[in-house]
Amino acid sequence: MSHRMAPEPEKSKTVAIYPGSFDPVTKGHLDLIARGAQIFDQLIVAVAHNSEKHPLFAAKERVEMLEAVTFDYKNVEIDLFEGLLVDYARSRKARVILRGIRAISDYEYELQMAMMNRKIEEQLETVFMMPAVAYSYLSSRLVKELARLGGPVKDLVPSIVEERLKAKFPSKS
Ligand code: PNS
């Protein structure tokens, strides 16, 4: 039986960007970084400078925490970006935007963003990945609320983030 062989894979490297606010990075984000680092040749975790008007952590702190928790990944880089994501992606020669989808409720916003980005830059492909089920309810927003009200965040964020949250809300620790 004859069958059509797929062409040899291209040798060029696939650079993916995982953009977000990461205010702060959670174990859900880390799970996605681990998955992305296995699939793509280079993964750039890009922290949006001004995505929220009042982030809890300054952009520099968010980058510091990400750098600390991704230290072991040789093909993962942490960077900051401002302005349009598609412009940043072009400047980094990235072909893929990686985003995490937890529940159906994420889908509508993510679809809007992906379609808008595609409208501006057709060649840029958005790829969605799902985090482990254990993190499917996790968000930076809820982590911040828990920390602010003195709830336990130990299982939800890396220890460096737990420490920094304690420093932000000292009366609660
Ligand atoms: O972690 P978040 O807050 O869901 O990340 C959202 C982010 C930063 C990826 C998004 O707001 C973004 O891409 N901002 C950059 C500005 C931009 O390109 N906006 C148009 C998106 S359609």
Image (spheres, rainbow, N blue to C red):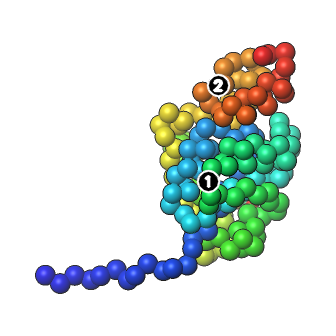
Is residue 173 placed above or below 142 in the rendered structure?
above
Query: Is residue 23 visible in the rendered structure shown here?
Result: yes
Quadrant of the drawing holding the C terminus: top right
Give the residue type at disc 1: Tyr
Q: Are marks 2 and 1 in contact (CB under 8 Å)?
A: no
Q: Which mark is residue 154?
A: 2
Q: Secondary structure at mark 2?
A: loop
Q: Is residue 112 visible?
A: no
Toward the left, the furthest residue is 1
Percent coordinates x, y for residue 92 in the rendering? 72, 71
What amino acid is found at the position of numbered circle 2 in the picture? Lys
In this view, 173 is above or below 95: above
Where residue 47 appears, x then y in whole percent?
76, 53
Looking at the rendered structure, the secondary structure element under dot 1 is loop
Which corner quadrant holds the N terminus? bottom left
Q: Earlier in the sequence, mark 2 or mark 1?
A: 1
The circle drawn on residue 73 is 1
* Residue at x 64% of width, y 25% of height: 154
